[in-house]
Image (spheres, grey):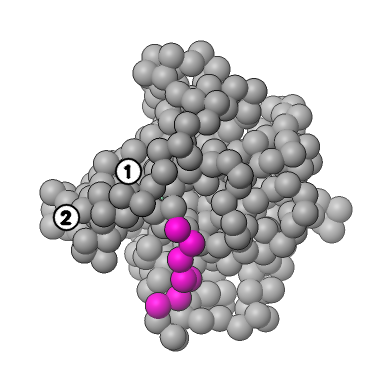
């Protein structure tokens, strides 16, 4: 991972990048970024705004988000940066947002919001917080936005996962952590594994509809999330971390590159589709993958007609 996930890795991999891929005029395109007020989400939002998109920041804290919105408007020179107060872990908040936003077309939906809590927290709906924020909330948001995503003609849905997911298999037996002693790093990595499987499934749901779905990992980037959630890791790696813009590069590339990168459903790192397993014991059965979808549908309170 050293020499790959870090800044050196980005420099090495980026030699193969084509600058023209990001030279895209996004005027008229609507892009949604959850957790767009900080770290990678903010870097993503800024890059999209600089290319002329209308960017909606979906954030949970009004104070932090207003400051970020104003700064992104200033640095991008784009006034079409909007703010919506959404707590992705709270299903009622997600539903309220979609009902009130009245979006006719969505060209990019970036599921970036993420956290690694030190102890078990339950969401407003009684779900473990990383499951709610990384998996169930994004699942509901994707489902409720299916019509405007299809209407865009060329839309991208991107799950910002993590390289940490390589350490975990798809584990669905104790999703609330009632029977295990809570480990935030494991909960985080397990839900990041779920995002990868969920993206593959959504890509099949949207196949042929002009909606590409991806998961990706950003490598190791210097953000406040890493500084506060992984202080020891940060101390060891801070000199070699990527900048937020470097970490966000593949998110932006997946959102804007023309034509849409293929295959839809794949897991990406530094603009390349990558294996989803390096350890044999992390491989899951199709039945477990199907069960993840069913659990997401159930937790999100989705009826068949919402799919
Ligand atoms: N940085 C890395 O090296 C790295 C590596 C692998 C994966 N990632 C992934 O990249 C994504 C961004 O991480 P980051 O490093 O930029 O973290 P960060 O600096 O902590 O930013 C996380 C963002 O998500 C928001 N957020 C968290 N929970 C939310 C919720 N329930 N509803 C709405 N917004 C919420 C935060 O809002 P507040 O400001 O209100 O807290 C913040 O805007 C995460 O999904 C993370 O797992 C990052």
Determine whether 187 is above or below 16 in the image. below
Locate the C terminus by quadrant. Answer: bottom right
Identify the residue under disc 2: 237
Q: Quarter-wise, where is residue 70 in the image?
A: top left
Q: Are marks 2 and 1 in contact (CB under 8 Å)?
A: no
Q: Which mark is residue 28?
A: none
The percent position of residue 244, horizontal first and vertical second, equals 32, 40
Of pointers 2 and 1, the one earlier in the residue sequence: 2
Asked if residue 66 lies left or right of residue 288, the reply is left
Magenta-tinted stretch: 272-278
Residue 154 visible in rendering: yes
Residue 106, position as x, y percentages in the image: 67, 35
Residue sitting at the far bottom: 281
273 inside magenta stretch: yes
Locate residue 71, reporting x and y percent: 37, 19
- Side of 169 relative to 297 (left or right): left
Where is residue 254 drawn, in percent x and y?
A: 52, 46
Q: Neighbour class for label 2 at 10 Å: few (<14), some, many (≥20)?
A: some
Whether residue 239 is situated above or below residue 283 in the rendered picture: above
Question: In this rendering, would 307 be left or right of 283?
Answer: right
Mark 1 Cα within 10 Å, few/some/many (few <14, many 20+)? many
Give 229 or 270, whichever is nearer the viewer: 270
Q: Mark 1 points at which residue?
A: 246
């Amino acid at each position: 991972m050293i020499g790959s996930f870090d800044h050196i890795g980005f420099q090495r991999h980026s030699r193969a990048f084509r600058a023209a891929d990001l030279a895209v005029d996004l005027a008229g395109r609507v892009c949604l970024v959850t957790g767009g007020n900080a770290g990678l989400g903010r870097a993503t939002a800024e890059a999209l705004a600089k290319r002329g998109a209308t960017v909606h920041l979906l954030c949970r804290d009004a104070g932090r988000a207003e400051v970020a919105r104003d700064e992104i408007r200033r640095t991008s020179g784009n006034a079409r940066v909007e703010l919506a107060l959404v707590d992705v872990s709270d299903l009622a908040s997600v539903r309220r947002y979609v009902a009130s936003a009245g979006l006719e077309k969505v060209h990019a939906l970036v599921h970036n919001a993420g956290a690694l809590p030190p102890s078990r927290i339950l969401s407003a709906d009684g779900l473990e917080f990383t499951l709610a924020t990384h998996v169930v909330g994004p699942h509901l948001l994707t489902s409720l936005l299916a019509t405007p995503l299809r209407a865009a003609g060329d839309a991208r849905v991107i799950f910002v996962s993590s390289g940490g997911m390589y350490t975990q298999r798809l584990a669905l037996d104790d999703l609330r952590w009632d029977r295990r002693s809570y480990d935030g790093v494991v909960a985080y990595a397990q839900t990041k594994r779920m995002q990868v499987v969920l993206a593959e499934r959504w890509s099949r749901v949207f196949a042929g509809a002009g909606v590409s779905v991806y998961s990706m990992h950003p490598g190791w980037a210097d953000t406040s999330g890493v500084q506060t959630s992984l202080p020891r890791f940060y101390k060891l790696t801070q000199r070699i971390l990527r900048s937020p813009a470097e970490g966000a590069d593949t998110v932006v590339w997946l959102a804007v590159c023309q034509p849409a990168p293929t295959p839809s459903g794949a897991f990406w790192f530094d603009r390349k589709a990558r294996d989803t397993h390096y350890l044999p014991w992390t491989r899951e059965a199709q039945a477990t993958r199907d069960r993840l979808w069913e659990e997401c549908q159930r937790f999100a309170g989705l009826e068949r007609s919402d799919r």
